Image (spheres, grey):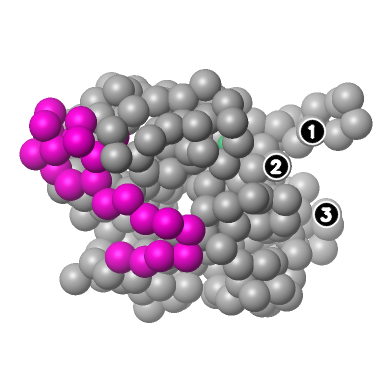
Amino acid sequence: MKVTWLGHAAFLLEGEDRVLVDPFLTGNPSAAVKPGEAECDIVCVTHAHADHYGDAEEVAKSNGAPLVGIFEIATRAEGKGCEAIGMNIGGTTKMSNTSITMTNAIHSSCFVGNGTVEAGGNPAGYVFESGARVYHSGDTAVFGDMELIGELYEPDLALLPIGDFYTMGPREAVKAVELLGVKRVIPMHYSTFDVIRQDPKVFKELVAKQTGSEAIVLSPGESVNLG
Ligand code: NI
Ligand code: MN
């Protein structure tokens, strides 16, 4: 599987299918592609916040791709003309040659309007399996059941936020690596905005020192290949 960071929490996972996760491209200062350039077979969103849901509807429609999200988000997307698949936490769906498991995340989730909020169901993470197994935690705090995610799904790679303020910071993300027992981690959700500015090299050093695992620091647009 080829894993490409598109900036912030957006990733393109190319196994047997091309899965685009959290396509926040318009208005994302670190986005590596424009919405019109994003090609995929499946779009997955972790939660309703604009820096994750982003261009999901447009990209799903232009690619003829299903939009996968939690039931509440999928129902809303269907109302906007998307082909949507609403699943829920703890479940797995097999789509084409990719299996998608929705996991817990400790965060919030809503669509923000003009001074209003609309419920977006619970926030989530995902484990994707297509040859390799990749865990995208979504926005979350560290939580003890990451150990269970590691035990059940044995991810080869974790994509974890390190930006702090809205999510885990580096210290908590190192603990997450430990709980997951994962050998490789790509930090995400940092330095897009000032409030989440972090030096990923500090995280990389902490991971090496405290866990023996490897943090792979990518620039937006860069990829890593999993065997
Ligand atoms: Ni969020
Ligand atoms: Mn976020």
Q: Which residue is mark 1?
A: 112
Name the residue at 37% across, 55% down.
218
Q: Dot 2, how many residues are within 10 Å of its Cα: few (below 14), some (14-19), or many (20+)?
A: some
Residue 27 picture location, percent across and down: 72, 51
Q: Which mark is residue 50?
A: 2
Amino acid type of the residue tagged 1 in the rendering: Val
The residue positioned farthest toward the right in the image shown: 114
- Tell me: is circle 3 under 8 Å from ligand 1: no
Q: Which residues are magenta?
A: 203-224
- What is the secondary structure assignment of the residue under circle 3? helix
Secondary element type, mark 1: strand
Distance from label 1 to label 2 (Cα)?
8 Å
On the question of residue 163 being in view, the answer is yes
Give the residue number, with chain letter if any, for mark 3: 79
The percent position of residue 209, horizontal first and vertical second, equals 11, 32
Q: Disc 1 or 2, which lies upstream in sequence?
A: 2
